[in-house]
Each structure stands twice: as structure tokens, then as C-alpha cells.
Image (spheres, coloured by chain):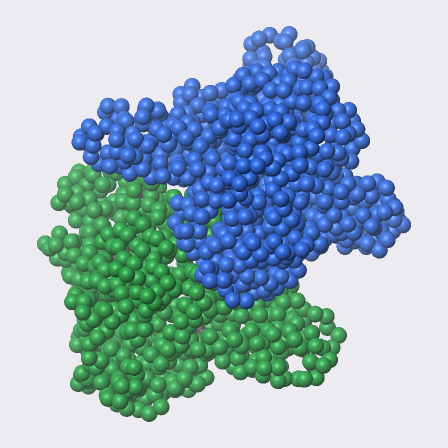
Chain colours: A green, B blue
Amino acid sequence: MENPPQFSGFVEVRGAREHNLKDLSLRVPRDALVVFTGVSGSGKSSLAFGTLYAEAQRRYLESVSPYARRLFHQVGAPDVDAIEGLPPAVALQQQRGAPTARSSVGSVTTLSNLVRMLYSRAGTYPPGQGIVYAEGFSPNTPEGACPNCHGQGRVYEVTEGSMVPDASLTIRGRAVAAWPLAWGGQNQRDILVSLGINVDVPWRELPPETREWILFSDEQPVVPVYPGLSPEETRRAVKRQLEPSYMGTFSSARRHVMHTFASTESAAMRRRVQTYMIAAECPVCHGKRLRPEALAVTFAGHDITEFSRLPLKQVSALLRPYAAGQEDAQLAQDQPAQAIARQRLTEDLVARLAVLLDLGLGYLQLERSTPTLSPGELQRLRLATQLYSNLFGVVYVLDEPSAGLHPADTEALLTALSGLKAAGNSLFVVEHDLDVVRRADWLVDVGPGAGEQGGEILYSGPPEGLRNIQNSKTAEYLFRAASQEARQPRTPSGWLELNGVTRHNLNDLSVRFPLGVLTCVTGVSGSGKSTLVSQVLAETLAAHLGQGSVEQASGSQDEEDLGDSQLPTTSAHLGGDFTSLSRLVQVNQKPIGRTPRSNMATYTGLFDHVRKLFAATPLARQRGYGAGRFSFNVKGGRCEHCQGEGWVMVELLFLPSVYAPCPVCHGTRYNAETLEVQERGRTIAEVLGMTVDTAWDFFKDDPAVFRSLDTLREVGLGYLRLGQPATELSGGEAQRIKLATELQRAGRGQTLYILDEPTTGLHPADVERLARQLERLVEAGHTVITVEHDMQLVVGSDWVIDVGPGAGDEGGRVVAQGTPQEVAGTPGSRTAPYLALALGEVGFVDRLKG
Amino acid sequence: MENPPQFSGFVEVRGAREHNLKDLSLRVPRDALVVFTGVSGSGKSSLAFGTLYAEAQRRYLESVSPYARRLFHQVGAPDVDAIEGLPPAVALQQQRGAPTARSSVGSVTTLSNLVRMLYSRAGTYPPGQGIVYAEGFSPNTPEGACPNCHGQGRVYEVTEGSMVPDASLTIRGRAVAAWPLAWGGQNQRDILVSLGINVDVPWRELPPETREWILFSDEQPVVPVYPGLSPEETRRAVKRQLEPSYMGTFSSARRHVMHTFASTESAAMRRRVQTYMIAAECPVCHGKRLRPEALAVTFAGHDITEFSRLPLKQVSALLRPYAAGQEDAQLAQDQPAQAIARQRLTEDLVARLAVLLDLGLGYLQLERSTPTLSPGELQRLRLATQLYSNLFGVVYVLDEPSAGLHPADTEALLTALSGLKAAGNSLFVVEHDLDVVRRADWLVDVGPGAGEQGGEILYSGPPEGLRNIQNSKTAEYLFRAASQEARQPRTPSGWLELNGVTRHNLNDLSVRFPLGVLTCVTGVSGSGKSTLVSQVLAETLAAHLGQGSVEQASGSQDEEDLGDSQLPTTSAHLGGDFTSLSRLVQVNQKPIGRTPRSNMATYTGLFDHVRKLFAATPLARQRGYGAGRFSFNVKGGRCEHCQGEGWVMVELLFLPSVYAPCPVCHGTRYNAETLEVQERGRTIAEVLGMTVDTAWDFFKDDPAVFRSLDTLREVGLGYLRLGQPATELSGGEAQRIKLATELQRAGRGQTLYILDEPTTGLHPADVERLARQLERLVEAGHTVITVEHDMQLVVGSDWVIDVGPGAGDEGGRVVAQGTPQEVAGTPGSRTAPYLALALGEVGFVDRLKG
Ligand SMILES: Nc1ncnc2c1ncn2[C@@H]1O[C@H](COP(=O)(O)OP(=O)(O)O)[C@@H](O)[C@H]1O
Ligand SMILES: Nc1ncnc2c1ncn2[C@@H]1O[C@H](COP(=O)(O)OP(=O)(O)O)[C@@H](O)[C@H]1O
Ligand SMILES: Nc1ncnc2c1ncn2[C@@H]1O[C@H](COP(=O)(O)OP(=O)(O)O)[C@@H](O)[C@H]1O
Ligand SMILES: Nc1ncnc2c1ncn2[C@@H]1O[C@H](COP(=O)(O)OP(=O)(O)O)[C@@H](O)[C@H]1O
Ligand SMILES: [Zn+2]
Ligand SMILES: [Zn+2]
Ligand SMILES: [Zn+2]
Ligand SMILES: [Zn+2]
């Protein structure tokens, strides 16, 4: 084939076999926007990330450093025969786990550095104050940190109430909860006995000075301890100076808590003592984390902390006059150097902010911490930052950059991508959004199905050529008539009301959600959808239902670090028919576990049944192996070298850590004896290696296992292996596993399901399947509320609530609500035109398709 | 300016100010061979490495990893306003320090991996033996290592002779030298006294069983110790069971040595005890480091260790028939899988070896350890490896790739560079070799002088355009008449003979070196020049002169690690007028120190004088500051945060570690009080910041300081700062500092100076200056012998010894010797044609200039 003339050159791949890829050969142009499409599990990521990106990284880093070479030798290269013409690559990937590094919008974008320079060089100083260097404006440097709270913004205290939660208990009954558990606590009690303090009366009956001393003293008397003896006997022993068992050192409860907090290396210990501490705003910096000298410097009337709490849109508006050199001609005359610095820095800032605003992120603040951002927001932040990184000749590999983006903002995304291309780079993008797919210079369609049924190249070429590809699901959606027929909406069984909602940009908002139907909450990114649904609605209802926290279908509760939680203030109350709901479940895309130790089989519970089958085999019974023997999570049957992980972690400083197969069990996770036991010719490790489809066949006659497998197949996960580690599953796969787990439960009263952007990572064909599953839930009498951007799903819903009209301060209201058709006709809603388009309303189709 | 049509695009640099660069702006083409020229110290490296490479690395790594971003934030970016169109870069730099990672030719080139696969999959196994996996052929894996010596190839023993070097000493007189020094040794002596052993007779008079027990016992009796008492008093005290000072534990000398060796964390301790250990070949693997199973597998009759000791040229010849599929048709029929593996692997190996042979490295062996290679050999190895790395679209930045290369091999180097270019990469090369310079697609000439006098772009464009640039030293040499006039050679004052030289590829060779003149030893890379001159001649003469080791003008003796030293066997004896020589000095390009703690001022000794001047100032005297106060190497005056380094080291896993300025003293190295002392208005830190030129002016009236500075100026180092850390000096600068130090010494008898490739890193203009300095040494009655490739220097010498004709086994003989003119006329010498060319012999000029 001749190179189409518009491309400068090609990357040629031969024999790609990573994961499910079937010995693929293909070529994709450089200096172009190449989009990889295909249903979930078809192998797009295995090709774009697992093969092209991984190989580009490996080659470059190996050339740069012998250290990298050794690591890659251990970890292994992607399974591919040859790749030619492949430049170094940069991945802007959506993190499947949580981002590990503590960072903020300001640090990720490097805007904070510029702002600190701006304050240092062009801020307004109080008369007579010396210059504060840029680092002096960072709470993370010794120069900048508030000396009282060390830059934390808060101080931690203990009180009698926090350390003695139940004053009716005696000391022997563990009134002083803050003291260590086990021996350490007994020791303190015995010391108090030796000191003649009554440990057998309720705490509140002790004299105040005694309580004060026990809790807060800095003294550390060393006293003889007689652990076996009663208080009476101890008194006598002390008097007679009998030989004690040992000499014990007293430590007040505060001393113990503070000392442990400051010096323990055990995260669990630290967490334990934290529960006895109360955080309060630092009285010196008032939570602003900086030294007084730094906070005394202002720009446009704001100190730097206030500045970093403004929405970026406002920051940009505030800086624009300075960038244009319109402000304060006097300064330019008096202090030309300062004026020049100010003009240059603000100009640079304004230019960089413009990209962020274009990408629909103007509602964020510099201070916002990245763990509170959605993966899509974070990826767009990094994308915007790259536009200023000045890289040339690299391949950017992106993972669904449209995730979380309202259709209205897609154009800005495409502009950003074009910017990177114009700067001399190639773009390899895994994407489902048809608006993006349509704008590709080159399409690679992977399929036709998922897993074993996928892994082939259906098409590789300019988009138009896909039209004639028979078995491509992508072609089906990309070129089919644009509209979907409006469905007759269901009638709600009742209404749930949420009144007086106040959090983030929501201010005393009241909203009604229909029960027994499927509702989509729409609106531009930052309009307040997640705050309303995933936060306030979920928390308020959970509190009402007495679910201490929302039941995450994920099982694991996220730990909150103390320093983090500026706990959001909420006020909201329920109304309407909320009493008819008996359960609340959030089905999100968070991983079903964060280590290779969890997998689909353990998560869904089907592995319990499988293990029992193995324990019932003759050999297992003869050897006395119980079901526990077949767990890789406890000692006994597992390989002890990798402790049943099957993998060992290899630290790569400049890359996410990777896992290499365990050299002892070669990834089977079990020790040799355990693998001698077989169920109908298969070892437990082999069962974990089966796909759902294979296992479905194998376990036909074991109803307990079979039922789980059957549901997993129904949600389209037949291609997954039972033991596939949680860390290898995409967000969409994780979400569908959770859905399957839910679908499998028999009706436990009326449940409200909350889903936040469930279509992320899903091909239109997968979205159709998801819609069917949600309908099954509704048909079973449950309520489903989703936050959603994908019009394909919205069109098929029963009710739409459009939040907006804009983001941040410009959003937070209900702009439209009703059936999809009603909302499509509401003027002022930014969602309406797209909904209308999807519904096939004429006019819009012509305007938007172009 | 229009882009010349042949270039696809340009890298644009604006405002480069790194080191001495004077706010440069320039552009250089991508996908081309760009050569940076200029005299030493002009700023070529600051531009190519310090700016272009550093910035490319920073951008890419920052994009790849937030961790890298934090590091670069600390370390700082290159000082440049903007660079556009700059792809990611890979440096093939000559290491200024020693390579840190332990590696071999096989591992650096990754050929070892292939060879292990070849042995595993296509080796000849003894009947019945199971397969050995590739790792099983590496002594560095548990699977492969010989279990007896843990893959070391040698075992360590102690003997009476090694631990008691002088048997005439008493125990009190430290006969057992292997015991610890100081208190630990006294303790053992006191224990022996308590045990009733006579510590006051010569060791050899003790009964053999006693000696055996003291040295080798595994017993550890605990006995009362009476340190103050005499043996007689001790005896009585023991008898009476008097209260001892303490209870002491005996440890035999072997126990102490072995235990310390195995468990100490102090490198110094380990080195100390190593001196009492004797290495012997491992009796199990006979030094081959592998398990018997691995050694039982052969290929073409060699086990893998033997294989890795063959010269690469021979390896290639041996594999070629297999690669061509010509060997053993029977196998192809019987075991087609093995035959295919063998053919593929040997084919790949032969192709990769070809590049190494082309680059003149066929004489190396896979096993050869990289620290024994010259920097030029190592760089060419890495270059050859890159030809197989498949990188596309990167910039390779190289540092004088012709270093160590005979002119006959330059063509192969240019072919290798073209290969990288043809694969789609850009080449930025710092180079002095005019043959390479001539072949550039684009030249950047930096100058006109060094340091402050340099840092400007004299020319940037296609080579021909440099012809008309007035102040370019490069133009002067590149376009001047090709020949140099033959000088009348000096008459030797005598002859030094070296007979029966046997080492490496030299076998019973006899050579005569003229005394009192300048001799150049020439020959292709690997012919044996360094072995002859820098090793055998140097060592033999040093032994004769009683210089325990050769006086490295560098002062620091290289540490040899025990595991390393396959001590070369040498036999050679001196003859002729060797008695007239009274001193031997090697002036090499090794760094004058390996940390920023050493610098020119400390190395040359002039800093001692400067410190005395500061100690003599009134304030210093008033405060009682001695000269030591002004040292940054000892406590007192230095900054304790960085311990006087001025820098703190930052570890970068994928890059060489870097140094960032000390945050406390801001790089001044001194504490505030010390900096209050001034000598004529300058602090000690400011003096260290002066260039030699400035200091020369400042210290005009201090003869001791002035003399040093004057010589440094003479060797062309006027642009260096006094305190410039050793780690920032190029090899050429280090060598000239050493030369200056030598030139400064008054005649101390006749000295033999040995220089190994002194022109490396030198511009032709610098070579001319070097030649003058060497002549000064000769004129002072000394003898100079250099190993050299640069015909400019060879032509000007008095005598030439050409070693060869080829490399490795094909070299090792004296092919020609005589005056330059005589050697130029010797047929069979590969050097002759180039020498003739340089001497302006017609015919050659036409043939080679083309
Ligand atoms: N790390 C992995 N190890 C093994 N199999 C994997 C891994 N990651 C993905 N897979 C499998 O490879 C196939 C393709 O997955 P993927 O490339 O993620 O598809 P897509 O990006 O199209 O959703 C699926 O069967 C998936 O389960
Ligand atoms: N954890 C948080 N901390 C501070 N502000 C937040 C947080 N989460 C959301 N916000 C703010 O609340 C507003 C609504 O955000 P969000 O609910 O995430 O919108 P949506 O879900 O529609 O994208 C935005 O201005 C956003 O910046
Ligand atoms: N790391 C460094 N820090 C400060 N100055 C340096 C450093 N490295 C080199 N220099 C100085 O910069 C100037 C140019 O040096 P360099 O770029 O190495 O020249 P060249 O490569 O042309 O020999 C010299 O004055 C040199 O001493
Ligand atoms: N440390 C060493 N160990 C083993 N072989 C060596 C070592 N140094 C040199 N040789 C071998 O000796 C021969 C001559 O090498 P060398 O003296 O370095 O040549 P030249 O200096 O002419 O480049 C080559 O075959 C080389 O491989
Ligand atoms: Zn504070
Ligand atoms: Zn294991
Ligand atoms: Zn051995
Ligand atoms: Zn310091």
C-alpha cells in the first residue's frame, strides 16, 4: 500500500500478541490523531498502551539508563515481533487506582510555581518588609511553612472527651480509651494502682486533679509494678518495699497519643491514636498554612492562599488586565523591573489558564487536591499542562480524554489535541465518543468481540473507510442514522425529595427524584451533578437508612487521611416517599481491589464455592485439606514466596510500579502440594486461569458457582479470567462486575442505585448492554439514578434532571427536568440541543453534524 | 534565513546562558549529523550536553513522571529562554568518572542475553540432562551461580602467613596483624594473657598447637580480663578469682577476618581485613562461576564461560556458519525447533557483532569488564548497541566518539552514525577529529576562546561556510594546507629497553624507547599500545624505581575491588640505560578527584598558600582562626549542612546523580563567621570563585600563589575558576592541570612521563599547545612517551613506535619504528598512510581527502 500523501510517516507494528491480541500487524501514521476503537475488552488498550506505549517507554528508558535496562529485563518487554518508526511516548492515562502522589491542581499544572514567583517578584509588600522568595510561598518548604502548624493549617489537640469517650467506665474497664491496647494499657493501669489511684470507680467519680494528671501530665514517674496483685495487696507490697516484677514508667494519655502520632512507623497505630485527636484550625495562620510574612504579601488584594482558592476562571479574569499591561502605569514608572516581571508572569499565567478554561476546567481552584478530582478531570489537567511542555516528536497516548466531558465541551478537547499535533507530536487515543472518533485522521478498530473473541484489527485507515467493514460494531454506531427512537417513559412509583441542599456550588437547592424509574442527571462538567447525586443524596439517604456510610458496591471503604479532610459541610433533608426505600448502593468504577490479591472470583464470592469443591475431593480429604487450603490469601496452601500474589512488585521510580511473575510458583500463587489436588483434572490455579465462558461450561453442574458465572456472562464479561487481578481490570469492567453482583442478589426490598458516569470506557455497543441491565433493575422495582454525559443512555431514560447552566458558580441549579423529550425542548439548557440531536429532532442534526 | 531544502526541520534555541554561554540563539537541523566544534573550554559541551541534552531529558522525564518533576524543580533547568522543536534525547557520553555499574561487554551490549538463550535453547546437553533456562547461564542469578563460590569464581582463605606476616614479632608486638587495631586488638591480647599464653615471646616460638588455636579456633571462651595487670599479676588474679574489669570473649583471627568481611558495613574495614585473605580459584567451577549443569552445556565445543572469553571477532567467525544454516543438516531434521532457534539466534548475534567489528572492537571479549575499557571503547560499545535499539525520532548526543580510534577506523564510525541517522534520529556530536568534522551535515563552531573568552557562536551552518569565518580556530585547521612540515628529530640521550613483555596480546615482545625525546606509540585500537606503555612499561619501571605503584599524577590511587582483579600476569625486564631515570609519572585524563570536594586549587596546592594569607588577616588573628579554618574539608570553618561541599547530592534513578546547591550556604561552602574574614575585600569563597586569570591579577604580589597560577595560565586554563569542582572538569582539563603541576616542579632528576591519548577532548589548537608543553618537558631533559592517534602530535614527535598490525591476536608486534618520516614509509603499517598524509606526502592526500 502506498503511504497516503498527507502523512509524514508511519509506525509499523508486526506480530503484536500482548494479552488477547492475535499476532497483529498494522501501521498507523505519525504526526496525526489516531483513534483506537472497539468494544470493552476488545484489546484497544492492550494495543495502544500495552504494546505501543510500553515498547516506546522501554526503548527510550533502556537507552537512557542501564538501571532501567535491568528492570525491564526482569519485567519483560511487550510481546511483539517488531515495531519500527516508533518515537518515545508519553501516556496521559486515567489512573485506575487512586493517584498516589499528594498534589493539587496548582502543582499538577505547575501553575503554582508561577503564582509563587508572581507574589515574590510582583506582590504588594507591607512597607519595610524584605522580599519573600518563591519557595517562601509554599507551605511545603521550611521557608514557607507556618511555624506553628508546620504548614498543615491545622493543629491537633486531645481533650478529656476525646480520650475518655465513656466516663461511666472504670480505669480497669478501659475508661482511658486512648491508652494502648493489650499489655501497654494494663501496664499503665498497674502503674496507677502502684500510685494508689482507684482504678475500680467510674472515671467521672475520680477527683478532677487526678483525672487531669492521668490524662495530661508531662511527668513520667517510674514506679514498682506488681501485676499479679490486687490494689490492696499492691499497697502493702509498696509499703514493705517488696521486690517488684519490674519498674514501670507512667505516660499520660496525651503523651502517649502525641508521641505515637509523631513517631510511629505503623500506619495502623497512627490511625488508631488519630481517632483520639481533635483537629482545629491553626490559630497562627488560620488554616492558610503559610508564615505571616508570606501571608502579608498580596496581589490584587488577595493573599496567596485566598488567591489559590479562587476558581481558575476568576483568576484568569483578575490577571488579564495586568497581562495586557493596563494596570498601574505608576508602578511601571517607579519600579520598571517589578512591572516587567508582573506583566510577563501574568501573561504567561493567562495563556496557560486559557487552555484550562477551554477544556471546561475553569471551575477548579489551584488549591483543589487531585484525589478529589474525577479521573477525567485529572487527565484533562495533565493534557492542558502538556500543551506547555514543549515536547516535540513524541507520541502522546491517551485514554478516553472525553471521559466526564459534556458534549458541549468536546470541541475544546479536540482543539487541545490539535495543539499537541501542531507542535510536532503524534496522538494515539483510545476513545468511544463518536464525536471524537469522527475527527480522527486515522482509525484503528479492534474487535470484533471482547477477550478471546477480540484482538483482531477490523480496520486501520482514515475514518470514512470503516463504513464498509461488516463485523465492526463501531461502524454500526458511527454511520447509522443519527437518531434513536424516543421510548415511552415509565411512570414513577413515587418521588424522593431532597431539600435545602448546600455544598460546593449548590446553595439551598431542592430537587425531586422519581422512584422506580431510570433517571439521568446531566450538565456540563463542574455544574454540580456529582455533588448533588454521588455526595449529598447518597450521604443523606445513607444517614437516614442507618448505613453508617454509603454501601459502596466496591466493599472497601476509602481511607481518609487526617490532613486531607476539610470535611465538607452539608445541610440537606429528605422528603417525599423516601421511606419506601430500604437500601442504597453506589455502583462506581472504582477498582474492586487495589492489589493483585483481589480478583473477580473473590469479589463475587464464587471462589468460596470453588474452594469447597476442591476441599471435597478425595485427595484433599485424605490429606486433611480444608477449603482454606485453597485460598491464596492465607498461609497453608499458598506460595509463601509471593504470599499468594503470584507476582512480586518491582519499583520503577519513573513509572508506576509493576508486577513481575513470582519466580517460585511462576504465577500460580500456590505451593506444589496444593497443586497436586485436582477437581476433574484441573488444579485450583488452572480454574483461576479459566475465562468466565470456559468456567461456565466446566461448572455447569455446580449451581452455586454456575449462577454467578451466568450473570457475569450476561453483563458481557465472559472473556475475563476468574483470577484476573483487580489491578488489571478497567473501571468499566470493575463496574460491570459490581453490577453483576447486584443483579444476582434476590430482591431485598426497594433499592436506590446510584451510578456516576457509568458509560466511561464503554463502546456504544457496551452502553446498549448497560442500558438493558439498568432496565432489569428498574423492572425489578428498584430506582436507578445516574450522572451521565452519554446521550445514548440519556435518551433511553425515563426522567432527566439537567443541572447548570454552567460550571461552578455559574451552575448548581436545576435548569430543566422532565422526560428526555421535555428536557430536549427546554431553552437555556446546554444539554437540550444534544438530547434533541440524539432524539433526531431536525435542525440540530444539520447544525451539529457538519 | 530560509531553511536549506535538505533539512526536514530545525531545533531553535533562544537565549542559552548555561555556564559561559553568552545568551546564544541558534538553530540546528534535525535528522542530520550536527557537529559542535571549538577549543577546549569554549562551551561546546555546555551547549550540546548542558543545554540541549539536559533540556530534552528534563522535558521528557517531567512529562512522564511527577517524581521527575519534583527532582528537576530542585536541581534546576538549564538556563535558556526557549528551545523549540527539540525531541527527547539520549546521551552517549564519555564518563568523566569511572562507570559505576559493574558490567561487562556482554551485558552493556545485551549480547550476553542472546548467548544465554542460545546455550539454553540450542546448546549441546549431556545425554539425559534437563534443560537449563537462560538465567541458569548467568553467575549473577541463584539459578546459575556456582554453589561453592556463589558465582564469584574464587574462594577466600586465610593462612598463618597471611595473618601473621612477621613471625618474629611477639603477640604484644602485634604479631597477629589480622586482629583489629586499637582497643579490639588489646582486648584479644589481654584475653590471651588471662588464658595463660605467653604474649612476650616471638610468635614463631609459641607451640604450634597454640598458634593454630589462636589463629583458627572456632571456640569463643569468655574469660575475666584484667587490662592493667602484667601477665604475672594476671595469673595471680585469675587464681584468686579477683573481680575482673570485665569479661572478654575470645575470637580467633580467622573468625574475626571472616566475620568482619561478611558482615561489616564499613568499606574501609572490609578492605582492611581483605588484605589478610588469599583468593584462590574455586575448586568446583574452576573460576568459571557457574553451576556444573550449566558448564556441561556446550556450543561448538565451548562451554559458555570459554565462549565469553573468545574475542568477538572469533565469536562472529564461529557463529557465521550456523547463522547461514550451513551446519548440521541432521539436527534440522531431527529437532527442527532447536535448529530454528539456533539459526535465528546466531543470525541475530552475527548481525549485532558485525557492528562491533566494524567499529574496531573485535578484539574485546564478552567477559571483559567495563571498568577496564577506555572511555572511548565504552562509548563505541554503547553506540553499537544503539544501532539495535530501534529508537526513532530522538536526538543522540555524543561526546567525541572518535576518542581512542585510529584514523583507519574513522570510516566505520561515520557509517555507524549514518545508521542512526537513517533510522530517523538526529545526531549532535561534540568532536575534534577533522575527518569527522568534515563529514558533518551542519557545523556549530563555538568560541573564539575558552571560558569568558568563549561562549559565542562563531558559525552555524553547512561545513563549507566556515571557511570564511575570521576568528574561528576550527576554520584555521579545517581548511589549511593539509600537511605539516617535518621537524628535525632530536637525538636520544640513551635507550631504555623492555624485553620479554608478555601480557594480553603481547607475547615475549622486546621494545626500545629513546630517552630524552618525545616518543609516540601508535597503532589501531586494541593493538596493545596501552598494555605496553601504560601498563607493562609503567609497572616494570615503577617496580625498579621502588615506587610501590606508579605515581599517578592524579594523586589518588584507584581502589581495586577484590572480586575484580584477575591480576594480569606479566613478565618483562628492563635493559639499556634505565638507570639514568629517577622518576616515573603518568599524566592521564582521569579526574583529579571524584567529588566536588577536590578542585584545582586543592589539587595544585595553591589553596594552602591562599588559606595562610587569610589566616594572617587581622580579623582572623583576632578570632584565632588558623589556616585550617579556611578549609572546606574539615570541621570549623566549613558549612556543616553540606560538610563543605557547597552542594548536596540528589539521586536520580534513571540519570547520573546530580548535585544541587546547598540550601544553607548557597554553595559558598563556608559558614557565615568564616565569610566575615576578608583578604583585600574578598572572602575565601569569593577567591574560590575567581578564574585563574582574575586570581593571577589579584595575587600578583604573593609569589607562592602567583607561580602556580602563572603555570595554569600557560597550559591554557586561565578561564577555569579556582574552586571549580573536580567533577566539572573535562578529562582534558584534568590532564592539563596535572601537566601544569608537573611543569611547576623544579628538576628532580630525569623523569619519564607517560601519557595515554593526551589529545582526547582537545581541539587542534589545543593539541598544538599541548605539544609545546611536552617539548618543554623534553627540553628540561625528561623523556615523554605518549600513546596517540592524533597525527598532528605524531608528526611533531622525535620517534614513533607503531604497534600492530591489527588488534588483539592480530596485533601485539612492533610493525615499524623510527622517526616520523621513516615510519611513514614503512609498508604494512596501518599508521604509515595517515602519517604520510600528515607529512604532506603526495598521493595519499588525493586518495584520502575525497
Ligand atoms: N494486565 C493484563 N494481563 C492479562 N490480561 C489482560 C491484562 N489487561 C487486560 N487484559 C485482557 O486483555 C483483553 C483486552 O483488554 P483491553 O486491552 O484492556 O481491552 P480494551 O482496552 O479494548 O477494553 C481482555 O481480555 C482483558 O481482560
Ligand atoms: N472535593 C471538592 N472540594 C472542593 N470543591 C469541589 C469538590 N468537589 C467538587 N467541587 C466543586 O463543586 C462544583 C461542582 O462540582 P461537581 O459536583 O464535581 O460537578 P460535576 O459532577 O457536574 O462535574 C465545582 O465548582 C467543583 O469545583
Ligand atoms: N558544571 C559546570 N559548572 C560551572 N561551569 C562549568 C561547568 N562545566 C563547565 N563549565 C565551564 O563552562 C565553560 C565551557 O566549558 P565546556 O562547555 O565544558 O567547554 P568545551 O566542551 O567546549 O570544552 C568553561 O569555562 C568551563 O569551565
Ligand atoms: N584488562 C584487560 N583484560 C583483558 N584483556 C585486555 C585488558 N586490557 C587489554 N586487553 C586486551 O589486550 C589487547 C590490547 O589492548 P590494549 O592494550 O588496550 O590496546 P590499545 O591500547 O592499542 O587500544 C586487546 O586484545 C585487549 O582486548
Ligand atoms: Zn499555621
Ligand atoms: Zn509465588
Ligand atoms: Zn565456583
Ligand atoms: Zn552548605
In front here: B297 or A154?
Answer: B297
Q: Residue at x 24, y 41 (%)?
A: A674
Residue B259: % across, % down: 53, 27
**Residue sitting farthest toward the front:** B842
Left or right, B504 with reference to B202: left
- The part of the image, by quadrant, that contains residue B553 is top right
In front here: B377 or B547?
Answer: B377
- The part of the image, by quadrant, that contains residue B755 is top right
Work out whether residue A200 can be spotted: no
Q: Residue at x 24, y 62 (%)?
A: A446
Residue A60: % across, % down: 43, 52
Q: Residue at x 64, y 34 (%)?
A: B795
In front here: B450 or A53?
Answer: B450
Left or right, B255 with reference to B291: right
Q: Residue at x 20, y 32 (%)?
A: B332
Look at the image and tell me in which quarter the N terminus of chain B lies. Answer: bottom right
Residue A533: % across, % down: 34, 78
Residue A500: % across, % down: 40, 86
In front here: B381 or A3?
Answer: A3
Does A779 sit above or below residue B830? below
Work out whether residue A5 can be spotted: yes
**Residue sitting farthest toward the left:** A701
Left or right, A100 with reference to B567: left
- So how many labels did they put on this image? 0
